[in-house]
Image: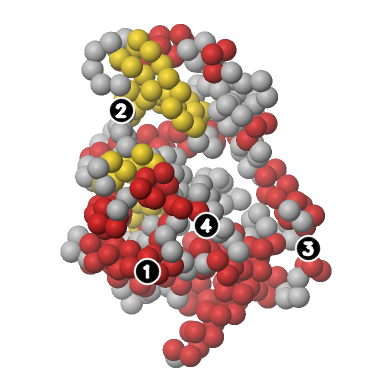
Amino acid sequence: MSSLDKNIYTYSCQKLPYYVPSSRAPTKFNPMRPGYKQEDIDMQPLIEAVYNFLRAEVVHTMLIGRGFFNVVYELEMKTGPPLVARIQWNYKTDPVSSSWVVEKMSREVAVLELLKSVSPQVPAPRVLACDFAFNNSVGAPFTIINRLYGEDLWMSWPKLSAEDRITFVKSLASSFVGIFNVRLPSIGSLQKLTADGLPVIGSILPHIILVPMEPCATLEQQVDPPYDAFAQPHDQTLYNFSLPDLFGRIRTLAIAVIPRDDPAMLVPVLVHVDLNNRNIMVKDGTVSGILDWEIHSSLPACLGATYPDFMRYDAAYHPKYGTETRLMPTKECWPSEDEAATLRNIFREAAGPLSADFVRALDKGEILRQLLELVSCCKFSSQGMIALFTWEQEITKTVVSKN
């Protein structure tokens, strides 16, 4: 990492409510901290908490995974199917960061409740109990959910046959459309549900952008964020183009490509912002689980419809821009460019009969989605800024030639 990128990275990480690198997180459940041993952690408080909430007896606990924010334990029950405990481990404890943890966890619970009532065909977990207190008996905020079975997509993909891949992509299209079909009242992020089950929209939390974005009434307001927040950590003298001029053009382009001719494209819908190949589970060749709903938004339909990340080769996902290596978690879980194009066609054809709005949104929001993704890439590296500049030059020529 260059000294420039180190400065950008440090600046951005200081503004985040979690630890980067995550090994610095001081919680006892941090599986990356020096000297960590799972057998040293007393699981009895969790066992007792589950009984107090559900009046169900846990007979065994087993660590089955971890993410950037949570460790995941399978809970073998004396009667009934196994459950899962998701325990927070990567968070800062200052008042602002603590509030962020509670907010994102409570919002995830609200999203899962909404999906259960509005779009139950989406294979999302069901929340059975939760405790957001930092000083609870377990020692960290946690949720208890039902156990979803399957294998992470990144692990399953290399083992799927060509026929199974087609079947899987069709089932994935159904899940994407199911999420897209959840309509919300405004742009932002689901904050909670009323007693009647109606969604209340709040700001987008700063784990998605560097500064919280308040709820918006229009897409014009959303695409006009404080771009200075993205340019601030960068040293202008190290670029051969003007950062203020670049973001001025980006702002103009964003406003120009809003699909105002189609009102359906401006209706806010639910968006899983982190729907990558680690958060999709596969079983018997179909989608068996969509996980980690903490990072979500309510966005206009033209931004809410997208192809799955692993089959994309546009903008931030194109190798020529250098913002996605296509090596993580393994290079084998990424299809080739030719196969990805075929998969996108299959995905599109499967989605069409389920929602014509979804397919139109794939097309009408394409440029705006790419723009906002590349702007976000500027947060952590100079390569992201260069990619945004290069893309803007190329897309401007394309738009001009079409006109």
Q: Quick check: 218 above or below 100?
A: below
Is disc 2 in contact with disc 4, using a CB cutoff of under 8 Å?
Answer: no
Q: Nearer the viewer, residue 129 or 220?
A: 129
4 or 3: tag closer to the N-terminus: 3
3 or 2: tag closer to the N-terminus: 2
Q: Quick check: 136 above or below 14?
A: above
Query: Of tags 2 and 4, which is closer to the observer?
Result: 4
Specify few, some or many for label 3: CA neighbours under 10 Å numbering under 14, 14-19, or 20 or more: few
Residue 235, labelled with which disc?
A: 3
Q: Which residue is mark 4?
A: 326
> Which residue is depicted at the point 65% across and 32% down?
23
Query: Of tags 3 and 2, which is closer to the observer?
Result: 2
Give how far apart the Cα atoms at labels 2 and 4 are: 32 Å
Q: Is residue 306 visible?
A: no
Q: Secondary structure at mark 1?
A: helix
Number of numbered discs overlaid on the protein picture? 4
Q: Amino acid at mark 4?
A: Arg
User: What percent of the width, then of the height, locates residue 77?
Assistant: 30, 14
1 or 4: tag closer to the N-terminus: 4
Give how far apart the Cα atoms at labels 2 and 1 are: 35 Å
> Which residue is depicted at the point 66% across and 20% down?
35
Q: Amino acid at mark 2?
A: Asn
User: What percent of the width, then of the height, locates residue 220?
Assistant: 47, 67
Is disc 2 in contact with disc 1, using a CB cutoff of under 8 Å?
Answer: no
Query: Of tags 2 and 1, which is closer to the observer?
Result: 1
Q: Which residue is mark 2?
A: 146
Q: Nearer the viewer, residue 388 or 324?
A: 324
Q: Which residue is mark 1?
A: 341
User: What percent of the width, then of the height, locates residue 48?
Assistant: 40, 9
Is disc 3 in contact with disc 2, using a CB cutoff of under 8 Å?
Answer: no
Give how far apart the Cα atoms at labels 4 and 3 are: 28 Å
